[in-house]
Image (spheres, rainbow, N blue to C red):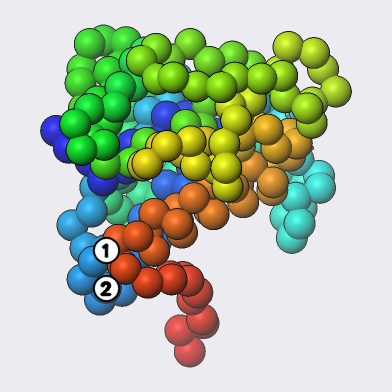
C-alpha cells in the first residue's frame, strides 16, 4: 500500500508531525483530501518516563498522558494509520518512492518518510545517512542524523532529538510541525499555515 507520508517513530516529534498533517483535512482544501499517513511506533518514547512541568501552557502532566492526548487529537482529524511495529528498513526506490519494511516483514511505500526515532540509536537499514554524536545532549552516546532544515534527501526528513535538537518536548514537537508544514506546502503548491479560530 502507498502512503503520502510514513513517519517512523510515534513520540513527541513523530506524533506532532502526524497531527499537523491530519489537521489539513476537512477544510475544503482539495489538495489535502484523500491523503493517507502512516505512523510506525515501537512504543519506547522518552515521554513514557517523563513528568512534564515546563511545557508552555500545560500544567504538570505525565508524558504518557500527553502521548494519549495527541493520539486522540490525531484520531479526531482522521487519515492516519498506526502500526505498533518497528521499522527495520527504509530504501529509496525509483522516482523517490520510499519502501518501508516493518519487523514482521510488511512492506509499504511512501512519497515522504519522516524519521522520528529519538536519539538513543538508529537500527534502520537501507539508507545512506550521516550519523553523528548529538551535540545538544549532556549524556554521551546520543546520536543525530545530519540534515539541512530537517531534510536529508528528496522526500526524506528527520525530526526531534534524532535531528539533533535538545531533548525537550516543545522543541521536538515543533520540528515535527515544521516538517509537516513543508510537506503540506508541497502538496498545495504554495505556503500553507493551519490556524483555527473559536467557532462562536
Ligand atoms: C525521564 C525523562 C524526563 C523528561 N522530562 C522532560 C521535561 O520535563 N520537559 C521536557 O520538555 N522534556 C522532557 N523530557 C524529554 C522528552 O521526553 C523528549 O525530548 C521527547 O520525548 C523527544 O521526542 P522525540 O520524538 O525525539 O523522541 P521520542 O519521544 O523518544 O520518540 C521516539 C519514538 O520512536 C520510536 N522508534 C524508534 N525507532 C523506531 C523504529 N525503527 N520503528 C518504529 N518506531 C521507532 C521509539 O520507540 C519512540 O516511541 C524527558 C525525558 C525523559 C527520559
Is residue 113 among the parts visible in the rendering? yes
Residue 32 — which label?
A: 1
Horizontally, residue 96 falls left or right of residue 119, namely left
Q: What's the residue at 74%, 60% (across, down)?
A: 57
Q: Which image quarter: residue 155?
A: top left
Instruction: Tally the marks.
Output: 2
Q: CA distance from mark 1 to mark 2?
A: 5 Å
Q: Nearer the viewer, residue 7 or 154?
A: 154
Mark 1: which secondary structure?
A: loop
In this picture, is 78 found above or below 90? below
In this picture, is 167 found above or below 16? above
On the image, numbered disc 2 is attached to which residue? 29
Q: What's the residue at 31%, 67% (across, down)?
A: 188
Q: What's the residue at 37%, 72% (across, down)?
A: 190
Residue 124 — which label?
A: none
Q: Nearer the viewer, residue 110 or 145?
A: 145
Classify mark 2: residues with Cα within 10 Å, few (<14), some (14-19) or many (20+).
Answer: few
Q: Nearer the viewer, residue 97 or 61?
A: 97
Is residue 85 among the parts visible in the rendering? no
Q: Nearer the viewer, residue 45 or 178?
A: 178
Q: Position of residue 143 (x, y in %)?
A: 66, 20
* Quadrant of the image where one finds ligand 1: top right
C-beta proximity under 8 Å, tags 1 and 2 = yes
Horizontally, residue 46 falls left or right of residue 156, namely right
Q: Position of residue 75 (x, y in %)?
A: 36, 49
In this picture, is 155 found above or below 145? below
Q: What's the residue at 50%, 22% (across, down)?
A: 129
In the rendered view of the protein, which quadrant contains the N terminus?
A: top left
In this picture, is 171 found above or below 100? below
Amino acid at each position: 500500500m502507498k502512503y503520502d507520508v510514513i513517519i517512523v517513530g510515534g513520540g513527541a516529534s513523530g506524533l506532532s508531525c502526524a497531527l499537523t498533517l491530519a489537521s489539513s483535512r476537512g477544510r475544503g482544501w482539495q489538495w489535502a483530501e484523500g491523503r493517507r499517513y502512516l505512523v510506525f511506533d515501537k512504543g519506547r518514547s522518552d515521554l513514557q518516563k517523563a513528568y512534564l512541568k515546563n511545557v508552555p501552557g500545560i500544567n504538570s502532566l505525565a508524558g504518557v498522558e500527553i502521548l494519549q492526548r495527541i493520539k486522540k487529537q490525531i484520531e479526531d482529524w482522521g487519515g492516519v494509520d498506526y502500526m505498533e511495529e518497528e521499522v527495520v528498513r527504509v530504501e529509496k526506490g525509483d522516482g523517490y518512492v520510499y519502501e518501508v519494511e516493518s519487523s514482521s516483514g510488511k512492506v509499504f511505500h511512501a512519497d515522504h518518510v519522516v524519521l522520528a526515532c529519538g536519539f538513543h540509536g538508529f537500527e534502520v537499514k537501507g539508507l545512506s545517512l550521516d550519523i553523528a554524536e548529538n551535540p545538544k545532549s549532556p549524556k554521551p552516546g546520543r546520536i543525530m542524523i545530519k540534515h539541512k532544515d530537517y531534510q536529508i534527501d528528496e522526500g526524506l526528513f528527520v525530526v526531534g532529538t534524532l535531528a539533533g535538537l535538545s531533548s525537550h518536548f516543545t522543541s521536538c514537537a515543533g520540528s515535527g510541525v515544521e516538517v509537516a508544514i513543508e510537506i503540506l506546502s508541497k502538496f498545495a503548491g504554495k505556503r500553507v499555515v493551519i490556524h483555527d479560530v473559536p467557532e462562536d
